[in-house]
Image: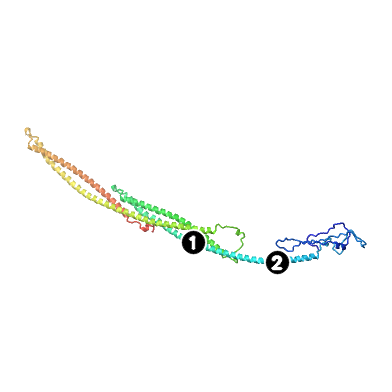
Amino acid sequence: MEFLGTTQNASYCGPKKGCDFAEQSLTAPAPVIQECYQPYYLPGYRFLNSWRPSLFYRVSNAQTCPEGGVTTCHKGLKPPTILPALRSGLFCRYSPHDWDRSNELQMRGAEASQLWAGRLMGDSVRLMQDKDQLTHQMQEGTCRNLGQRLSDIGFWKSELSYELDRLLNENRSMDMVRRRLECAADEVNCPLQVALECLYHREKRIGIDLVHDNVEKNLIQEVDLLKCCQEQMRKLAQRIDTQMRDNRDAQHALERDLEDKSSAQFIDEKCFNLRNTSDCISFFHGVEKIDGTISVPETWAKFSNDNIRHSQNMRANSIRLQEEAKNLFETLSDQMWQQFTSTNLAFTARISEVMDVKNKLQVQLAKTLQQIFQAENTITLLERSIMAKECPLKVAQTRLEYRSRRPNVELCRDNPQFKLVNEVFTIDDTLQTLKLRLRETQDTLQLLVMTKCRLEHELAIKANTLCIDKERCLAMRKTFPSTPRLVGYT
């Protein structure tokens, strides 16, 4: 039988000579045993894959043969025939000491292995208990952290929901105020159209009545005021619309944050409810090495806090705009009512003035007609008087003409002659005076007629003015939008 590993072959150190085995055995030196076997593995020990004994026997070397020997010495001696035929087998034997030493080493290795295994198993049990306890504590800590995280998410969700509800209510209030402003601006179109119609109708006044009076000034002021009110309402409505867009941006931010927190709450609740016996758990190798977080608890809370603060600022701006709209409604409605009342009072005063002037003109027209009638009668009388003076003048001139035919000395400037001449001159002067008075009376009659025409024209103008101011303008201005309609309540 051959041992595994490499075997050492014996070699002769000198010439081959005959020798005696007895002598050889007596003089052979003690074998040197070298221990190189490692029977077990311990930490810090060097592990060997194979071992071999270091026991070697020197080959006997016979120099001389004993004298008188029976046998003949040979140069090379062969082992006895009872030994193995192979040379290598002769030198692979172990000594009893090696055998005992090997057994002792095996015993010691087994005891050391058992001791090490016992210690290792005890340490393993303690390690498993410690690690189980550590794992359980870490899992409980993670559950507590998840519970605290769910509580924080619930708190911020409630804050966000509360702020979102208030912002939605504010948006509805803002939308109502914006609609009121738009309705009020549209409602102002009616009195504005009335004022413009009054101005257009008053442009149809005739002659001297086409005057820039107090009524026209009030109408122009009313038109300007109504347009200014409309512009202020529409500008405020635009500002409210812009604020509503900002409110919707804040609303979308709150809704997006609330939706993200709802998703995170659902995921954390799912994680919180996971147990070691859950069905949906699995290995995700390397997931702990990936850090996809984009915030820390401080920035996470600050993000929601900033959204809430931004929403609160938007609500504060909305409240200020609503107060401004309320004050604007009150101010503008009062201004429009005051201007409307002032214009109506101006119309009433102007109509009274025109009526008074018209009555006076009618009185003057009546007097003028009376004077025309008297002038016509006077003209008739003057014409008759002139015609009545023609015959006496003819008589006096005929007499003078006849008396001028007296002959010679009879053509005397006597008293009759003198009276006739005086009579002719007097009648002629009377006729001239009557004719002059007749022309004057006729001129006066023409003047009276012209005055009558002017008065009638003025009366027509005043009647037209009264018709415009009283029947058209003032009739349209009897109705004005009520205060609720002016402030946007339809």
Q: Secondary structure at mark 1?
A: helix
Considering the image in quadrants, where does the C terminus appear? bottom left
Residue 119 seen in the figure: yes
Relative to residue 30, is residue 368 drawn left or right?
left
Task: Calculate the distance from the C-alpha at mark 1 to the C-alpha at mark 2.
Answer: 65 Å
Q: Residue at x 31, y 50 (%)?
A: 214
Residue 178 seen in the figure: no
Q: Kindly identify which numbered label has been placed on residue 70.
A: none
Q: Position of residue 379 (x, y in %)?
A: 17, 45
Q: Nearer the viewer, residue 266 or 433?
A: 266
For residue 260, above or below residue 439: below
Dot 1 or dot 2: first in sequence order is 2
Type of amino acid at the residue the image marks with label 2: Leu
Please name which of the two marks, 1 or 2, marks the residue nearer to the observer.
2
User: Residue at label 2?
Assistant: 115
Considering the image in quadrants, where does the N terminus appear? bottom right
- Count all numbered tags in the image, as a single digit: 2
Q: Secondary structure at mark 2?
A: helix
Q: How is the image coloured?
A: rainbow
Q: Quadrant of residue 131?
A: bottom right
Q: Quadrant of residue 21?
A: bottom right
Q: Kindly identify which numbered label has been placed on residue 159.
A: 1
Relative to residue 147, is residue 62 drawn left or right?
right
For residue 136, above or below residue 461: below
Q: Position of residue 91 (x, y in %)?
A: 82, 61
Type of amino acid at the residue the image marks with label 1: Glu
